[in-house]
Amino acid sequence: MSLIPGKRKESLEHPLVSLRDEMNRLFDSFWRGDFLPERFSFSREFPSVEVTETDDEVIVRAEVPGLEAGDLDLSITGDVLTIKGEKKEEKEEKEKESHRREVHYGSFSRSVRLPGSVDADKVTAECKKGVLKITLGKVESEKAKKITVKGEPTKKAK
């Protein structure tokens, strides 16, 4: 008696059945996107960003290869920084056949939530060698403050 309804014992033992099942698992994992290690997966977000924080400021670095300062538009609303821009395709007059196209062109927008409140008047942005660096000063109330604990001096043991 078979434990799987509708399947005969002979079909379970056939080598092509296990091959079919393995192929189904492979295609399922492909469509889920978990068949590649993380380092080979491709982010759909552009530009890629890195957000770091010090006691006095928040620093956002964004990779924007092929773009210059004039191609970018930055704005802050509350604790959200928005980076907008357009990467224009360079067209050549010569007719040529493309064999592979992985470079994307067109407009983009990326919004990043900042880890705290920032002072919109204390923001600088600089674009060098395809990396946009945005330095945002923190609001005074967000900065870490040292608190001195008062009390009786400790007595040293003899």
Image (cartoon, rainbow, N blue to C red):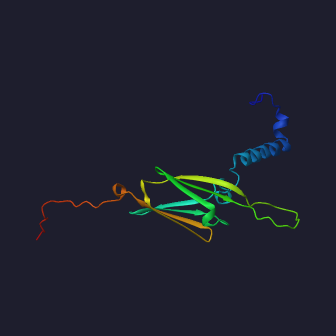
Q: Position of residue 134 (x, y in %)?
A: 51, 63
The mark total stands at 0
Q: Position of residue 108 (x, y in %)?
A: 65, 54
Q: Where is residue 62 in the image (x, y as percent from the top left)?
A: 58, 62
Give the residue displayed 62% in from the left and 64% down from the top.
70
39 sits left or right of 52 in the view: right
Q: Which of 19 and 2 is in front in this view?
A: 19
Residue 12 found in image quarter: top right
Residue 105 found in image quarter: bottom right
Give the residue displayed 85% in from the left and 43% down from the top.
16
Give the residue displayed 63% in from the left and 62% down from the top.
71
Q: In this view, does 154 lie above or below 6?
A: below
The quadrant of the picture occupied by the C terminus is: bottom left
Q: Which of 128 and 37 is in front in this view?
A: 128
124 sits left or right of 8 in the view: left
Q: Position of residue 51 (x, y in %)?
A: 51, 60
The quadrant of the picture occupied by the N terminus is: top right
Q: Which of 146 and 109 is in front in this view?
A: 109
58 sits left or right of 70 in the view: left
